Amino acid sequence: MSSAPPLNHQAPPSALRLAPPLAEPLADTRRRSPAEEARTLVASSTLGTLSTLSEDGHPWGSVVSYATIGEGVPVLMLSTLAEHGRNLALDQRVSLVVSESANGRDPLDSGRVTLAGRAERARDAEEEAAARAAYVEAVPAASVFGSFGDFSLWLLRVERVRWVGGFGRMDSCDAAAYAAVEPDPVAPATEYAVTHLNEDHADVLLLMAQRLAGYTDATTARCDRADRYGLDLRIGTPRGPAAARVAFTEPIVAPDGLRAASVELAQRARQT
Amino acid sequence: MSSAPPLNHQAPPSALRLAPPLAEPLADTRRRSPAEEARTLVASSTLGTLSTLSEDGHPWGSVVSYATIGEGVPVLMLSTLAEHGRNLALDQRVSLVVSESANGRDPLDSGRVTLAGRAERARDAEEEAAARAAYVEAVPAASVFGSFGDFSLWLLRVERVRWVGGFGRMDSCDAAAYAAVEPDPVAPATEYAVTHLNEDHADVLLLMAQRLAGYTDATTARCDRADRYGLDLRIGTPRGPAAARVAFTEPIVAPDGLRAASVELAQRARQT
């Protein structure tokens, strides 16, 4: 087996081909960066899978609850009664996987992120207090077990990030990029918004595909995902399936801004 | 930091104390073995988190779909485009974490299992064909990507198993024990059964607590879990909370046997 990986799927081109647009897209195609995807996913959950190293160097996975402080720093509270706690005492190299709830979608086509780095103790009493408060807020049971002598706080200092959004949507980023961005403020509202767009505004999504995304022959359009920058559309054409991005005019800054931005996008599609 | 772990939570006794029964329990307390818990959990899902070793020895977690063949052997299909696929080509030590769907319960009080072992190629063409067929059944998209040249099949030869059922419910088993048992046949039916028992038969659960579990002063009883061997009850008493196991007379062998076994247990409680 060669250690030089191929750069692309070794697949027949027909397996992955999507129809191109017929006209120049009018809408911008801006989307979240991999760092923003990672920060958003990490902020959306308090449950992950931690990989540590057993004493013999074997990789060891375990389920953990976590909180987040500062620039996306995960906080863990682990017992030395558990293998992961004993592992960390010996070797602080870890990774943490956080997965999006698939909610009926193909889980392989749903988001997940791996944060690789080192577990460290808090730098000072102030950081320790902030980490403990965040953990107890995220994991209420910790108000009991957090005082047990076998539990201690660890902060995951992120060194490397791998985000996978689903089939064909994946990228990596470094610690600086991960720390520099913020979680998408509209993320908690997108599941409802996507359902509402698909159930009640399919006609508008089709107009967006035809007039803003350049798919003048589109016959169907569904919204796959929404975020602060725009919508991902899945489009049907007589030439086969297609996918397109239609961005809002301005990124949304408020948690409740998705409706107004979608209405503005619909108006642009109608008036084009 | 000492590498000798404590044997118990370093906690005030009041934090973990449950009330003891007042009378000798009449029902057996048989329950699934850790190996059965692990096999049942692994059979219940096709999604897990794989821990592998990166080239520099850092533990690396990633989300994978899996199938199961034979005696609970997980089958993976991984691409060398992905870090886990490249890692496995260099070092075959892995662990796979499978988590129960928490369904609104505290995820730290829900089941998960870690299978540690080695990823290997199929032993022969027959095992390869069985593994591929099982994988495509579990992961329909593999009928497309399974033929891509960058994907290959791996079988996880389990060496060590750690099961965590929730707070205070955890144990380990070895490869032989894991291979020797079968998944609980009633597992897919238990969520509905537990809801039904709690919503419609709280009176019967209370009788079970009072007459079969020895909690003669029980004032409330809820069913936390059901399996082929019996029910886990959470009991309220004037002396504080308690937990008890009430086993069926015989283990259930058929997937639809939970109703009849529960009725029989209820009759025993009424007639005692």
Image: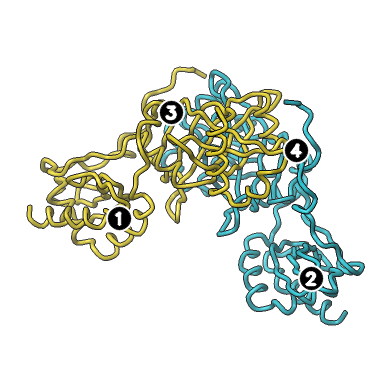
Chain colours: A cyan, B yellow
| Residue picked out by circle 1 | B256
Residue A149, x across and y down, in percent: 43, 29
SS of the residue under disc 3: loop
Q: In the figure, is residue A198 to the left or right of A269?
A: left
From the image, state whether disc 2 or disc 4 is nearer to you.
2
Q: Secondary structure at mark 2?
A: loop
- Whether residue A138 sits left or right of residue B144 in the image: it is left
Amino acid type of the residue tagged 3 in the rendering: Leu
Could you tell me how far apart the alpha carbons at marks 4 and 3 are, in whole angstroms? 31 Å
Callout 4, which amino acid?
Answer: Ala
Pair 2/3: label in front: 2
Q: Nearer the viewer, residue B250 or B122?
A: B122
* Sequence-first tag of 2 and 3: 3
Say which label, 4 or 3, has the lower sequence index.
3
Query: How crowded is the residue under tag 4: few (<14 C-alpha within 10 Å), some, or many (20+)?
Result: some
Q: Are marks 2 and 1 on the same chain?
A: no
First reached walking from the N terminus: tag 2 or tag 4: 4
Residue identified by numbered label 4? A175
SS for dot 4 = helix
Q: Amino acid at mark 1?
A: Asp
- Are the two marked residues, 4 and 3, in contact with CB atoms closer than 8 angstroms? no
B131, above or below A209, in the image: above
Is A214 located above or below residue B38 in the figure?
A: below
| Left or right of B84 on screen, residue B258 | left
Q: Report crowding for label 3: few under 14, some 14 to 19, many 20 or more residues within 10 A (C-alpha).
A: some
Q: Nearer the viewer, residue B221 or A122?
A: B221
Label 2 to label 4: alpha-carbon separation? 44 Å
Mark 2 and mark 1 residues within 8 Å of each other at the beta carbon: no
> Circle 2 sits on which residue?
A238
Percent coordinates x, y for residue A255 in the rendering: 68, 64
